[in-house]
Amino acid sequence: MFEVKSVTKDFGTVKAVNNLSFQSKQPEVIGIIGRSGAGKSTFLRIMNRMTTATDGKLLVDDKDVLALKGKAKLEWQRQCAMIFQQFNLVPRLDVLTNVILGQLNKQSVLRSSLMFFTREERHEALRLLDRFGVSHTALQRAETLSGGQQQRVAICRAMMQKPRYILADEPIASLDPLNARLVMEALQSISREENITVVCNLHTLDTARTYCDRVIGMQAGEKVFDDVSSRLSDQVAREIYGAEAEEAFESAITSTSLKSQVVRKPALAEQAVV
Ligand SMILES: Nc1ncnc2c1ncn2[C@@H]1O[C@H](COP(=O)(O)OP(=O)(O)O)[C@@H](O)[C@H]1O
Ligand SMILES: [Mg+2]
């Protein structure tokens, strides 16, 4: 599916990512863990071409996507949707519009600036909102939603792009444990049901173990662990996290205590389809 080959990124004398290599051969949820400054965000930004690598390749279908330019680069960016810690929705626009804007690359600038969307686009956006339990917010401004709801809307926006990959940079770092669980379940179900590989930077160990098929540990830009998540022992985790280990373990206790809570799934907001 893709192969990262000796990817390196220098910021002056700092090697943010240092000779990173790994392959993903089937749809999976990959968690990237490591203390702050390990290079997790830089790697995701390189992957979706928001940052240029100093060296290395990312092979997809035998092509180096790090070398793509112009339209081909935009097409790659459509194929790997990004999800951020701070959701990055347009606060004053309604939820439905935010989701439809996910396919912006495919639309003419004029059409998107006039907010002219087809009935099919609205239906698809609403179907996604319903799937992730937030269709009742379709007509609300994005800024009126809770963080957990906004992140699920951001996932819908990403899915509207019809991506092959989803890259999520600390998607639950600003969320309470219950919403964190809903967001991780959404990402996991997308991977399972749509055969999409999700690469997800995470700060807490428990989340990585619960929702990821595979975990890559990074330290000072280098890969120090790469295995199925069940092999991530406490001792290995302590080594990866170093001084931040207690924090990573502690968050695990809070999030497991909320696992039994249930959330009602609201009905489809049909009135949003006009
Ligand atoms: N734009 C930048 N300019 C200079 N240094 C940067 C920049 N972005 C990241 N870095 C440095 O690269 C290293 C990796 O950062 P980052 O990828 O954000 O780590 P993580 O996401 O694991 O916390 C850090 O030392 C950070 O200070
Ligand atoms: Mg980061």
Image (spheres, rainbow, N blue to C red):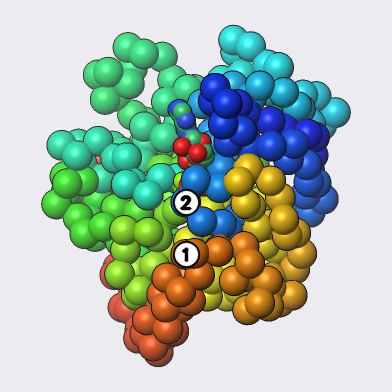
Would residue 172 appear left or right of 195 to someone viewing this image?
Answer: left
Q: Which residue is more in the foreground, 72 or 203?
A: 203
Q: Which residue is more in the foreground, 49 or 245?
A: 245
Tag 2's secondary structure? loop
Q: Are marks 2 and 1 in contact (CB under 8 Å)?
A: yes
Would residue 166 appear left or right of 124 to someone viewing this image?
Answer: right
In x, y percent, where is residue 91? Answer: 19, 39
Q: Which residue is mark 2?
A: 36
Q: Is mark 2 within 8 Å of ligand 1?
A: yes
Q: Which amino acid type corresponds to the residue marked 2 in the rendered image?
A: Ser
Residue found 76% across the figure and 64% down from its top = 227
Where is 31 relative to 56, above or below?
below
In x, y percent, where is residue 62? Answer: 85, 28
Residue ranking furthest to the right: 62
State the image quarter where residue 58 is shown. top right
Residue found 61% across the figure and 33% down from its top = 15
Q: Which residue is more in the foreground, 45 or 185?
A: 45
Q: Which residue is mark 1?
A: 244
Where is 265 relative to 120, above or below?
below
Would residue 60 appear left or right of 217 to someone viewing this image?
Answer: right
Of callouts 2 and 1, which one flags the residue occurring earlier in the amino acid sequence? 2
Q: CA gap, disc 2 to disc 1? A: 8 Å
In x, y percent, where is residue 199? Answer: 60, 50
Looking at the rendered image, the quarter that the N terminus falls into is: top right
Residue found 39% across the figure and 88% down from its top = 257
Tag 1's secondary structure? helix
